[in-house]
Every structure is written in structure tokens, then in C-alpha cells.
Image (cartoon, helix red, strand yellow):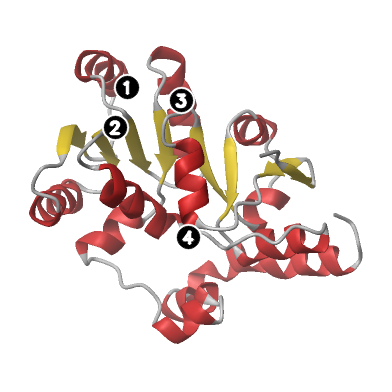
Amino acid sequence: MNPVEVNKIKIYPFQSKRELIEYVVDKQKILVATNAEKILKEDAKLQKIINNNIGYPDGVGAVMALKKKGYKAAKIPGVELWHDIIEWYYKEKSFYFIGSTQEVIETTVSKLKQEFPKIDIKNYRNGYLKDGDIKKIKADLLEKKPDIVFVAMGTPKQEYLMQEFMQVYPALYQGLGGSFDVYSGKLKRAPKIFLKLRIEFLYRLILEPKRIGRQSHLIKFLINLHLGKY
């Protein structure tokens, strides 16, 4: 499978989560959820990370851009993808978790152990890193040797961090944003009707009006897409 370039960002037009997971599960790459905000973002460092790894269509904007280029791609929410990876491979792979608050990460790990009793969790820690913590994590990754590392710290911080870890310890990495908060129950996902209509962004905006600045990227992106700029 070859990626498709949208505004200098390479996106893989996966048609399902299963296709994506089977393609990446044994690779040493970084999975990056790609949406309108990332496509528009003028960040050469982030762009390079995405293009050297595997950007997948997490947002409706990315799906629409791929469709306009002739590719039928599925919207693959990262908030679901990481859990599906675990569900399908927890008996074969080992995992490492970084992100959110101490309470949320502990709740997440506890819930995963209840849901998947045989899961092999090499280690976990919160996302509030202090001086020296990155060096400690690198050493721990080299010692524990997990197959898959999930980092939930928000873009672009999590992508920068995963790239730094990758240089020391190659594995499959995925950036998760606020996925641990959702899984632990701290945050609620949109009702099914919003998910079905692919307007989860609207529900999140209703709950968090301060996101209007971020959501404006989608409007700008859709205008540019309509004007044929991508």
C-alpha cells in the first residue's frame, strides 16, 4: 500500500481498521492520526514524522480529501484503534503505556487487566514528565522491550516524543491524544448518532466551546478542499 499526499502530508488510504492493523502490527513505525488540523499545520518537524511513518485518516477531513483524489478510505478513530490492536493481539504482543494523569493511567491499566486477563503490560506511567524522565523511559523501554508503545500526550508533543523514543528503541508506536481519558471514563465519547454521521467533532465542540479555535481548522480545510487546493 502506498500513501497519498494531501498538502504535503502522506496519508495511507486504509479501508478498514483491520486492514490498517494487519498492515502495521509487525512494523517498527509511528502511527499518526491524521485530520484537517494536522494537514493544515505548518510544522515541518511534525510533517516529517508523519511522512516517514504511517499517517492514517482519523478525521472526516482526511477521508474527504482522499475521496476527492479517488481513494475510498475509512475514518479510523485513534480512540478506537489502540483498543482494537490490544483486543486482537493481547495474547501475542506486549504493551507499554505513557500519558494522562496518574489516576487515569492507573484506572486504564486496571481496566485493561480486567478486560484482557492475559495482557502483557511491561510498564506504564503518567504523561507529566520532569527533568530526567525521558532518559529513564528510554532505559526502561530498552530493558522491558515492549512490542507496542502507546503515548497519550496530545499533538505534536506525543509525536515528537515517540520519534525520540524510536531512535533509541524501535517498536510500533501510536499517539493517542485523550484516549486514556475516554477509556477510563473521565471523558465521554459522542453519542452513536454523531459517530454515525461522522460529526464527532461537533459534539466535542458543544461540550468544550473553547475548542472553536481548533475546529476552525476544519472549516478552513473544507473551503480549501472545495477550491481544489489539495
As helix, strand or loop, the secondary structure at mark 2 comes to loop
Q: In this figure, which residue is indicated by the disc labeled 4?
A: 77
Of labels 1 and 3, earlier in sequence is: 3
Of labels 3 and 2, earlier in sequence is: 3
What separation in Å lies between label 2 and label 1 (alpha carbons)? 7 Å
**For this rendering, which residue is in front, 84 or 99?**
84
Q: Nearer the viewer, mark 4 or mark 1?
A: 4
Residue type at mark 2?
Leu
**For this rendering, which residue is in front, 45 or 63?**
63
Of labels 2 and 1, earlier in sequence is: 2
Q: In this figure, which residue is indicated by the disc labeled 3?
A: 28
**For this rendering, which residue is in front, 79 or 44?**
79
What separation in Å lies between label 4 and label 1 (alpha carbons)? 28 Å
Left or right of 57? Residue 114 is left
Q: In this figure, which residue is indicated by the disc labeled 1?
A: 134
Query: Residue, x 21% and y 60% (percent of image)?
Result: 184
- Mark 1: give few (<14), some (14-19) or many (20+) Cα within 10 Å: some
The image quarter containing residue 181 is bottom left
**For this rendering, which residue is in front, 80 or 98?**
80
Query: Residue, x 41% and y 31% (percent of image)?
Result: 172
How many numbered marks appear? 4
What separation in Å lies between label 2 and label 4 (alpha carbons)? 26 Å
Of labels 4 and 3, earlier in sequence is: 3
